[in-house]
Image (cartoon, rainbow, N blue to C red):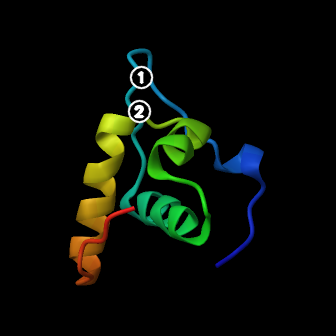
Amino acid sequence: MTSTSDDEFILKSDTIGRVRITKDKRELTIDRLDESRVKGLAFAKHVGVKYPAFPSWIQKCRRDRGERPTCR
């Protein structure tokens, strides 16, 4: 994985708080979560994603990769 600074990794949101990113960037976000020792809620806050959307990102990413879902 290529290294990126934390400031570069913060996700942008629209005026009502939705984060619109590409599938590749979403997968990179999930990879960063898996590498960190931070829980999902704290990680979502850190990168600027509303937590209710975050678990669906994780589920979709892992399903696309053929991985079994895991609990954190």
User: In the rendered image, which quarter contains the C terminus?
Assistant: bottom left
Task: List x then y, in percent, for residue 67.
Answer: 27, 82
Disc 1 vs disc 2: Cβ atoms closer than 8 Å?
yes
> Tag 1: residue type?
Gly
User: Which mark's residue is nearer the viewer, 1 or 2?
Assistant: 2
Residue 22 as seen in the image, left or right of residue 55: right
Number of the label disc, if any, that sits on residue 50: 2
What mark, if any, has residue 17 been given in the picture? 1
Q: Which tag, 1 or 2, sits closer to the chain's start?
A: 1
Taking 60 as reference, is 46 left or right? right
Give the image location of residue 47, x and y in percent: 58, 42
For this orientation, the residue located farthest to the front is 72
**Image location (x, y in percent) of residue 42:** 55, 42
In the image, what residue occupies the spot 48% across and 29% down?
Answer: 13
* The residue positioned farthest toward the top in the image shown: 15
Identify the element where label 2 is drawn. Answer: loop
Residue in the image at 43% along x and 57% along y: 26
> Can you tell which mark lies on residue 54?
none
Q: Quadrant of residue 5?
A: bottom right
**Picture residue at 33% right of the left edge, 60% below the top:** 58
Answer with left or right where residue 25 lies relative to residue 20. right
Q: Amino acid at mark 2?
A: Lys
| Label 1: few (<14), some (14–19) or many (≥20) C-alpha neighbours in 10 Å | few
Q: Residue at x 74, y 50 (%)?
A: 6
